Each structure stands twice: as structure tokens, then as C-alpha cells.
Image (spheres, rainbow, N blue to C red):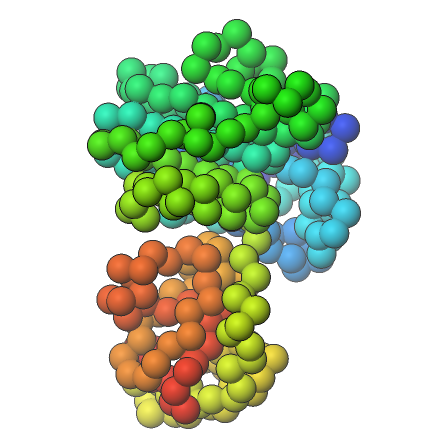
Amino acid sequence: MEAVIVSHSLATPDIAVIDLAPADAAEFPAYTAGAHVDVRLDSGLVRQYSLCGPPESGRYRLAVLNEPASRGGSRAMHALKVGDQLLISAPRNRFPLVTARRHVLLAGGIGITPLLAMVRQLETEGGDWVLHYCARSRAHAAFVPELAGEPRVIFHFDDGSPGQMLDIARDLGDPQPHTAVYVCGPAGFIDHVLGKAEALGWPPEALHKERFGNAAPDEGAGASGGFTVRLASTGAEYEVPDGRSVLDVLLENGVDAPYSCQQGICGECVVRLLAGEPDHRDDVLTDDEHAEGMFTTCASRAHSPVLELDL
């Protein structure tokens, strides 16, 4: 879809808040909290950004951290100005609110974006929730003015007193029935929260996460080496060398394979695995989805010599 930038401002020195409106008379599709859109930049880069609402405004709002270590997407977004146009996808949601009596939300830095939309949805629905928002400082935390004063929002700033720092044992506590936990932010923050929660006994099905980059594979995993990928529809086989993804090989051979982020975090490239032993390296599918045969062609590899895909 074509979208035009109608507002572009800095919420913090390094976070831009960008409002998009339809470039034509059509309305944007509706979305639910936790959804994101793909943004295609002039350079050809495609990046995913969470929608932080409010959805009833008829606009899409993004909050983008200017990340020096990025591959150029965040810098390009910060350089945009009102009136510029972008191509965006329809919203997709792999990080939705689930059915639960209570919702505990933990945001690290720019990870506030999908959780802010969740707060708004839970407020509208009268849900029971609490938000723990961690950031380097108040000056580096976006959306503080609209969250301050809400007793269910607890701020944790790195430059604050030790007593207000996030403590998972205190702030999350022991597992509670009918409670869902949502975590979003940098990889280190997510790993810390999930590791502590699991140590406290929280079951995996209660813990929900969204990353903005694929987690590093286990150091012990090592390189899987090359393997063959076979397409069930044609029987065609392609060699996937070490250092290349299944998706790379499929695309360079003219296979019409779905994809978007190419990092294993959006779920757009997922296909069904029909045969072979996969080496799952994505950070979007659940263990149950892996067991059902779902496979990300952009991130995952093989433990067996051949993988057969439903393509």
C-alpha cells in the first residue's frame, strides 16, 4: 500500500515517531495490538515496525530507534520528512494479546511500541494489566508523558536509584494461573527476562515475546554445513552451501518463495517441511509450530542431508 508521512517528530533524541496516512482515498486495514507492518524504503530495504496506535485514528503510527549498528533502515526512516511516501504492507500480527485474566507487560527501550498498543487495547476492553517499562533514562524513554500518572505503569530507569530497577523475582514473581507475560525489547533484555521467568517456574506457554532481530544461535550449534533442499511440487533439488540461506538459494533459482524480513522474526517465509531433520534457527515459531512441520527458509537450516519443502 502507498502511505504518506503526515507527521514526523522526535519523542527522544534517538526515537522518531512517524504517522502514516493512506496516499489515496482508501482506508488502512484495521489491526490489533501487537501487529507490525513491513516498510519498503527507496534503497530496497524492507524493515518491520510495530504499530503503536491508536488504531481508531485512521493512521498508522511507528516509533523508530535510530540504531547506529543497523544496516541503514533506521537512519533512512529518521531522514524522512512530512510529505514523503512509502510502500507498506498490510498489518500482520504474530505477537497478539492472548486470552487471560491478567496481563504482565515488560518493555525494554523501543520494545515499548507493541506493548503501548496492548495497553490501549486492554484499557478499552477493561482488562487487568500492569506494564514495567525499562529504559536507560527518562529522557531516552518514548511515550513517557502519556504513560506517566497511570498507576499500572512502573518505570525502571538505569540511571535511577537501585531500588527502582527491574527485579523479576519481585515484579513478576512466581507463576500465577491465567496470567500472560509479554516481553519486547533488545535481545539481552528479552533473554534476561525469559531466563529469570523460566527459573521461577513460569511455563513456556505463558511467556510471549517479540524480537526486533533474530537471536544468535547457540554457540554449541556450530555451522550445519551444506545440504540439499527439494521442492515437493516439482522434485527440483538445490544445493544450499554453508553461509547461504535456503531462501537465498530458492530466490536465485527463480522459485516464487514468500519472504519479508530475511531475519527469522516476521514469519512471512514460513513453509511446511515434509521430510528431513530441520535445524530451527528462527525466533518467531513456537515449539509446537516446529513440531507441526513449520520451517523458516530465511533462517533455519538442516541436520539431515536433504530437506523436502511444500513448495
Answer with the quarter of the image where residue 201 lies.
Answer: top left
Question: From the viewer's perspective, is 98 left or right of 94?
Answer: left
Relative image position of residue 271 (x, y in whole percent)? 35, 69
Whether residue 7 appears in this view of the structure is no
Residue at the spot 67% in from the left edge and 38% down from the top edge = 65
- Which one is in front, 136 or 75? 136
Residue at the spot 38% in from the left edge and 30% down from the top edge = 173
Residue at the spot 29% in from the left edge and 45% down from the top edge = 203
Answer with the quarter of the image where residue 242 lies.
Answer: bottom right
Residue at the spot 40% in from the left edge and 41% down from the top edge = 197
Question: From the viewer's perspective, is 135 left or right of 34?
Answer: right
- Which one is in front, 203 or 57? 203
- Which one is in front, 107 or 170? 170
Q: In this view, does 89 lie above or below 147?
A: below
Q: In this view, does 93 lie above or below 44?
A: above
Answer with the quarter of the image where residue 146 lies.
Answer: top right
Relative image position of residue 241 (x, y in whole percent)? 56, 87
- Which one is in front, 126 or 109? 109
Count of numbered badges drawn on the protein: 0
Relative image position of residue 54 (x, y in whole percent)? 46, 23
Q: Is residue 158 above or below residue 273?
A: above
The quarter of the image holding the C terminus is bottom left
Relative image position of residue 145 (x, y in whole percent)? 60, 13
Question: From the viewer's perspective, is 292 left or right of 284?
Answer: left
Whether residue 79 appears in this view of the structure is yes
